[in-house]
Image (cartoon, grey):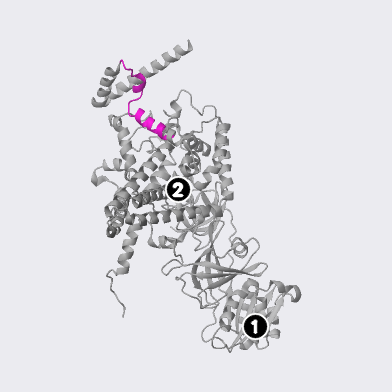
Amino acid sequence: MASTDTRPTLRSRLRSVAEAAVTPLDLDVVLDHFAPLRAGGDAQGRIVEVRPETDASATIVIKPSRAWAGHVPGQYVRIGVDVDGVRLWRTYSLTHGPRADRCISITVKAIEGGVVSNHLVHRARPGQMLQLGPAAGEFVLGDPMPRKLLLVTAGSGITPVIGMLRNLFSRATPVTADIVLLHSALSQSEVIFGEELRRYGAEGRIRLVEMHTDVHGLLEVDHLETIVPDLAERTTYACGPVGLLDSLETHHTERGLTLHLERFRTQLVTPGEGGTLAFTSAPDVTIEADGARPILDVAEDAGVLMPSGCRIGVCFGCVLPLTSGAVRDLRNGEVTIAAPGDGVAIQTCINAAAGPCEIAH
Amino acid sequence: MTVITKQPVNPTDHLTDADVEAIGVELDAIRQDILDVRGEKDAAYIRRVVDVQRKLELGSRAVLLVSILPPAWVIGTVGLSVAKILENMEIGHNVMHGQWDWMRDPKIHSTTWEWDNASTAEAWKHSHNEVHHTYTNIVGKDNDLGYGIMRVDEDQRWHPFHLGQPLWNFINACFFEYGIAAYDLELGKNLSIPKDKRSEKFKADLTKTFAKIRRQAAKDYLVNPALALPTGSAIPTLAANFTANLVRNLWSHSVIMCGHFPEGVETFEKKSIPADETRGQWYLRQMLGSANISGSKAMHLMSGNLSHQIEHHLFPDLPSSRYAEIAPKVEALFEKYELNYHQASLPRQVGSAWHKVVRLSLPNGFLATTTPKNLPSQAKLLWAMSTKGTKVRRAAQARLTQTERRLASEKAAAAAA
């Protein structure tokens, strides 16, 4: 029976008094300085260990705050990292757990030119804080899990799968599934979790088929039946580059086989000159914005009522959230790119569209 | 100082249009140099200041729970005063300027910060960021020139009310956070409009300000003293909080006065500013309309780096922690273009600002034309100017100005001879 009692409790009364004593600060903001991981606090976590895996990858073990609601192996999490002072958000698969100590982990591969990945692999240190989104994703084994599994992974696509395997093999009741893991990496030294996977293979927990591109060439989906003769009896889970996943999808659809895919979506926003301007309050309306005029002017010309101030970039009276897209600062050419959830706010009086953009307004 | 365009020698006369644009380019480059290296260290700085300030405030309030003990009262009051000053000046003012928006941290952002002050962030941002920083020192547009209760420039018309301005200034200083709140609401102007004709926005802003004042007053004069009741420290805590607010008011008022009031800071005529003021021209107005305070690092911090007023007015969106670094480059630019970099110690700037407030409490030319011998007749003139209406006042002012000019040219001729 749901309680509809809205009378103030002692706890809520104490909270009101505390808030009245520290206003205009929120009580939560104050408590963050003393116990950031407490119950009722924000979703964040503290790095407790940075474990190098290969030359260019590392596992970051994180102790999440009490706000962390747990996850199912195979899922991913959005992480907010402060890199050079700026909070940037990326998504990574969870490679450990759920664990008794409540810690979670992500395994990051440093991409060429990747700002966040290089920071996490080379500069992250225990004690640093990260922001956490909730666990999400449908790349999970399900309950009951399939009796015969084919796991196809390439490169960093091993990360959600290692999370699944570690959880399976750490259970109290032994797992009775028949698992084949087909993993492709550029070379043997680049196989993340190589030792661990080979150990699982040696222990008979999985049948491991390792392919190194420098020796064996790329994985050919057409040769799948040769490598895995009972392919038709297995449920396939695949994670890796777009090309591999697309060919797998075609292959399995043709044969009517069950396939679960985890696509790592890279946020490739190439800034251009001008673009379409959209507002969250009127999703059907798009305005053509040329790359040389401030978004403020373009929007006002189209009849949109916009907040504004000095109109010369000084007063920050025109700031609005850029939910997605790219804009260019007309004063110095600096480009700002945003994806949903990044928390990017821009001054509309000195930024012009540098591609399609959407503004929360 | 009268507006720059009415001075016998305009300090910018020697600059060509090309010079002004070159100044703009050089200042843009200084700004970009900082943007290029702004990063982890800057973020760590503001986070540390925020952390220290909050712990100082909470620690001081905790100490004040036993403020019936004199040492606790002193420590708590000093700590709370410093905490309030840091929050308003180095943190609040700068965060609300957008100086830290680049971090994309929703908790340290111009769109979300609410400060420990009677005025709301929203109202402050409008009157300060939008109006003052855009129309800096333009007589008739920048209301910071006197806050509507004083005249700080010869080109602001004298009114008998100004005779009391040293007192109004002092009262404003003591209750500065309320002065700011009233100012941000444009209270004088809006209250003079009949009630039924006042704008909805004003009424909404007024409600929000009252709510803010209520919360602030409850915090300092009700809740925290009440928490100290068990130790018998309620009244001492109330007194401590009142004192801390007073100290914050007096200090911030002094620092703010130093920004634009010291003698020699330039003001500008509305009609001499083109509607399409170029970047170089805007920069130049900021350069000449601001004054710096020189002193220790502690002074800079406690002033919220408004001691670097010139740098702040040139680059209000750069992290305040970077102003000290760029100051030598900015000063070098002043020298290169033979402009006056107005900088002096805190006592000198505060004294100079007060000197102006006292001097301009009297009509233009009054002090210059008064001698011990003609004091009685000058006093009668002042009385007439104050009581006999606008026409008499204007005529008398014109005569005073004429007399002043005559005396000045006689003096110059005598010196030349």
The residue identified by callout 1 is A200
What is the span of residues highlighted in magenta in the rendered image?
B349-373
Which dot, 2 or 1, sits closer to the camera? 2
Q: Quadrant of residue B131?
A: top left
Could you tell me which residue is drawn at 53 percent across and 75 percent down? A75
Q: Position of residue B128 (x, y in %)?
A: 40, 44
Residue A237: image tag: none
The residue identified by callout 2 is B90
Which residue sits furthest right? A215
Mark 2 and mark 1: Cα distance apart in space: 57 Å
- Given the image, on which type of amino acid does mark 2 rest? Glu
The local crowd at label 2, few if under 14, some if 14 to 19, many if 20 or more residues have their Cα within 10 Å, is many
Q: Which of the chains bears the disc numbered 2?
A: B
Residue A243 on the magenta span = no
Quick one: B109 or A217, which is closer to the camera? B109
Q: Position of residue B156 (x, y in %)?
A: 36, 30
Q: How many marks?
A: 2
Tags 2 and 1 touching, CB below 8 Å: no
Quick one: B204 or B153, which is closer to the camera? B153
Residue B111 appears in the rendering:
no
Residue B230 appears in the rendering:
yes
Q: Which of the chains bears the disc numbered 1?
A: A
Q: Is residue A144 above or below residue A296?
A: below
SS at badge 2: helix
Q: Position of residue B261 (x, y in %)?
A: 41, 34
- Magenta span: helix, strand or loop, mainly? helix
- Given the image, on which type of amino acid does mark 1 rest? Tyr
The local crowd at label 1, few if under 14, some if 14 to 19, many if 20 or more residues have their Cα within 10 Å, is some
SS at badge 1: helix
Could you tell me which residue is drawn at 53 percent across and 37 percent down? B280
